[in-house]
């Protein structure tokens, strides 16, 4: 509205700044209209998250594609996370419901951690899907390195507000933090 500007300073949450720059608001902005009350900040965050996710190429992902794909969900994952392992152990259930899963790396302990090294090895493997499955089964894989985007994926996750794993992002840009069982995920995606 007049005199207020939306400013991004590095993450998804905008600041609302007065025209003269003397005042700012950090929080949600709402629009009151005949359609009801609409959270404009949530809409902006959803759109910005969706745009950032569209910049990711399929080559950067480890994918488990459903035969009869209805939906695709991108999951920020860590190979040493218990709920990520539980999620991955049920990958066939997601795929059988028509949900393709695409993994991005988010080593929670950071890019100097053992999890990061393991994930680089998986992303650099000739059989990345098998490698990540073995790691999530607490098995070892050969150490491997190559030009990869694991560090960039981790930074993207931080930009998107990811603080834990698994963190699911729908095609519409909605963030679903934490483990979501297959049937529940299908219902959320159908909404």
Image: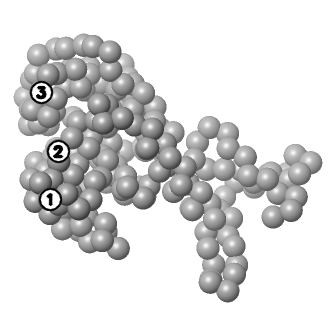
Decide: marks 1, 3 in contact (CB < 8 A)?
Answer: no
Secondary structure beneath dot 3 equals: loop
Which quadrant would residue 43 be assigned to in this image? bottom right
| Residue 14 percent location from the top left of the image | 66, 50
Q: Residue at x 59, y 57 (%)?
A: 44
Say which residue label 1 marks. Answer: 68
Left or right: residue 170 compared with residue 37: left
Marker disc for residue 127 = 3
Please identify the quarter of the rendering in which residue 121 is found: top left
Task: Residue 76: give x, y in percent of width and height.
Answer: 33, 42
Percent position of residue 73, x then y: 30, 52
- Which mark is nearer the camera, 1 or 3? 1
Q: Where does residue 56 sit, x and y in percent of width and height? A: 40, 37
Query: Whole-Å distance between the Cαs marked 2 and 1?
Result: 12 Å
Provide the secondary structure element on which disc 2 rests.
Answer: strand
Point out the frontmost of discs 2 and 1: 1
Number of residues whose C-alpha sits closer than 10 Å to that of mark 1, classed few (under 14), some (14–19) or many (20 or more): few
In the current view of this chain or complex, which residue is farthest to the bottom? 34
Q: Nearer the viewer, residue 62 or 175?
A: 62
Which residue is most to the front?
A: 68
The quarter of the rendered structure image containing the N terminus is bottom right
Q: Which mark is residue 64?
A: 2
Whichever of labels 1 and 3 marks the residue nearer the N terminus, that label is 1
Q: How far is disc 3 from disc 2 in space, using C-alphas? A: 12 Å
Residue at the spot 30% in from the left edge and 46% down from the top edge:
75
Say if residue 143 shows up in the picture: yes
Which color scheme is applied?
A: one colour
């Amino acid at each position: 509205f007049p005199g207020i500007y939306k400013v991004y300073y590095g993450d998804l949450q905008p600041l609302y700044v007065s025209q003269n720059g003397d005042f700012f608001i950090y929080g949600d902005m709402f629009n009151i209209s005949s359609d009801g009350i609409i959270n404009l900040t949530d809409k902006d965050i959803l759109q910005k998250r969706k745009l950032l996710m569209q910049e990711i190429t399929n080559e950067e992902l480890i994918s488990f594609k459903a035969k009869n794909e209805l939906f695709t969900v991108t999951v920020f994952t860590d190979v040493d996370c218990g709920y990520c392992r539980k999620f991955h152990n049920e990958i066939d259930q997601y795929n059988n419901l028509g949900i393709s899963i695409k993994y991005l790396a988010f080593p929670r302990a950071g890019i100097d951690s053992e999890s990061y090294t393991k994930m680089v090895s998986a992303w650099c493997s000739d059989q990345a899907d098998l490698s990540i499955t073995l790691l999530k089964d607490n098995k070892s894989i050969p150490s491997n390195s190559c030009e990869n985007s694991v560090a960039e994926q981790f930074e993207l996750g931080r930009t998107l507000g990811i603080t834990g794993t698994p963190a699911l992002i729908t095609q519409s840009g909605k963030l679903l933090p934490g483990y979501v069982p297959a049937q529940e995920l299908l219902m959320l995606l159908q909404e």
